Image: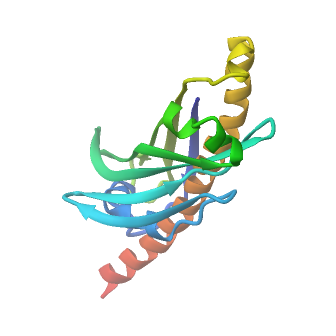
Amino acid sequence: QQSRKEQAVPAVTGGDLAEYVRVSPGFFSALEMPMGGSLKPLEQAGSSQLFELVVPRIQLFDLWMQPRAVAEVYAEDAGGGATRLVMSAKQCTLRGSSHVEKFKLNDRFSMDLAITFTSLQPQGQDAPGAILTEGKITVKVDIPPPFSFMPKSVLEATGSAAMLPALTAILNGFKKEMARDYVRWSAAQHQKVKQ
């Protein structure tokens, strides 16, 4: 599943959007995740920060699951003066209802999650900018019986319908919180400049 969202951020004197994105991996430490998800800092790894990411709960029929992964967050140059903040998650484990254990879904499941936040700052420091948020989640499951007897198209449609709300919830939560955090950060930067 893929999703793309853009969050406008107000023009704030003293707040360079690219600089904010470059220094904001720490922002994730205070982020509240929707729908029972969470993001907890683990450790600093060079120029990256590692987090434990708990994806919002996913419901499929009478089965529920909640993937957990180690997420790496780092900043990179996006070209044209823009900065991109990248979150990638691998090393996933799966927790959930009794069916997860019964069908050994943790052994049959893999998930890759990539979310990017790119600063879009127009010309002119007082012009409002935006943070473009893009996300992609790839899930692979070796489907166990009795589900494996269902048509593949039905399983894919059901899986996509279950994953899209989780990805959308993550992206919407990130973009709204990041826009608020940017305003706070910009105000603090402006105060530093005035002193």
Quadrant for the N terminus, please.
Answer: top right
What residue appears at the point 38 percent right and 69 percent down from the top-left corner?
Answer: 14
Q: Nearer the viewer, residue 48 or 130?
A: 48
The residue lying furthest to the bottom in this view is 195
How has the structure been colored for display? rainbow
Image quadrant in which you'd find residue 38: bottom right
Q: Note whether residue 56 is visible.
A: yes
Q: Is residue 180 left or right of residue 156?
A: left
Q: Is residue 18 left or right of residue 56?
A: left
Question: x%, y% of residue 10?
Answer: 54, 60
What residue appears at the point 67 percent right and 18 percent down from the top-left corner?
Answer: 148
Q: Nearer the viewer, residue 93 or 4?
A: 93
In the rendered image, the vertical position of residue 151 relative to residue 23, given as above or below:
above
The residue lying furthest to the right in this view is 62
Q: Is residue 148 left or right of residue 45?
A: right
Question: x%, y% of residue 72?
Answer: 35, 51
What residue appears at the point 74 percent right and 26 percent down from the top-left corner?
Answer: 158
Image quadrant in which you'd find residue 150: top right
Q: Note whether residue 168 is visible.
A: no
What residue appears at the point 72 percent right and 22 percent down from the top-left corner?
Answer: 147
